[in-house]
Image (tube, grey):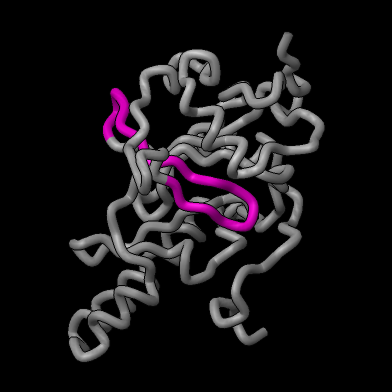
Amino acid sequence: MSTVGPAATGVPSGPWPTATDYVAAVQDPVATFHHPDLQQLRLREGLMGLPAVATGQNAIVFDADGPQGRTALRCFTSVPIRGDDAYRQLEAMDLPDVLVPVQWKADALEVHGTRWPAVSMPWIDGDTLTRWVGANVHRPARISALAEEWVEACRLMMACGVAHGDLQHGNVLVTSEGKLRLIDFDGVLLFDPASGAHLTAPPTEVGHPNYQHPQ
């Protein structure tokens, strides 16, 4: 019998599955996926016939195709800092294009008899910021255009009350059209644009120091 995390947070108690646990589990999608949207996903194949994945410090991301197109499924390997609070608020907001839309799935998939949450979002086909800059460093017009795109992205985020909270090279993608897209909202801070009052607790991390204001 499976167990389900508390309805108030969507987050069960640990220990959390490892990346290897998730890779093994999703190879039996009928038994693993419990959310109707996820049951329709078809995982893309990577090395040695295993599901294609990208791994990070706190999550593993599967590359899949589904009814809404190519999808990134983010499965947590440690307690998500925000639980479902900020993710559910983000899901309900009218966000600018620079912020990739997310959907929190509280009881997404079952591993070792427990149902774990996950986040799904459109797959963004682009380069990380560092890779894009490296490929375009001798094209000053493109660099200038991206810098203007960055300033506009910051303006739009301030206007809707969102601070990313974990800006770093891997979380900033550039599409083939030269458009910025931000991913990974585990450290996001939501606030009231009018008053500046926090709508979520302050993040426990601030991202890469080179992405922070000097003050």
Magenta region includes residue 168 = no
Between 45 and 89, which is closer to the camera in this rendering? 45
Q: Residue at x 66, y 55 (%)?
A: 195
For the N terminus, which image quadrant? top right
Q: Is residue 89 above or below residue 48?
A: above
Horizontal side of 128 relative to 84 (left or right) equals: left
Residue 45: x and y, percent?
33, 39
Q: Is residue 207 above or below residue 24?
A: below
Residue 86 coordinates in the image, percent (x, y): 63, 41
Q: Is residue 102 visible?
A: yes
Task: Give the magenta range.
Answer: 53-69
Location of residue 107 by image quarter? top right
Looking at the image, the residue that sits furthest to the front is 48
Find residue 14 and report its horizontal and vertical position in percent: 80, 35
* Above-or-below relation of 148 to 105: below
**Residue drawn at (71%, 19%) of the image:** 113
Instruction: Name the residue: 31% across, 80% down.
Output: 133
Q: Between 68 and 44, which is closer to the camera in this rendering? A: 44
Q: Nearer the viewer, residue 166 or 17?
A: 17
Identified at 41% across, 47% down, the residue is 100
Residue 83 is situated, as x and y percent measured from the top left of the image, at 70, 38
For the stretch drawn in magenta, the main secondary structure is strand
Residue lying at the far top of the rendered structure: 1
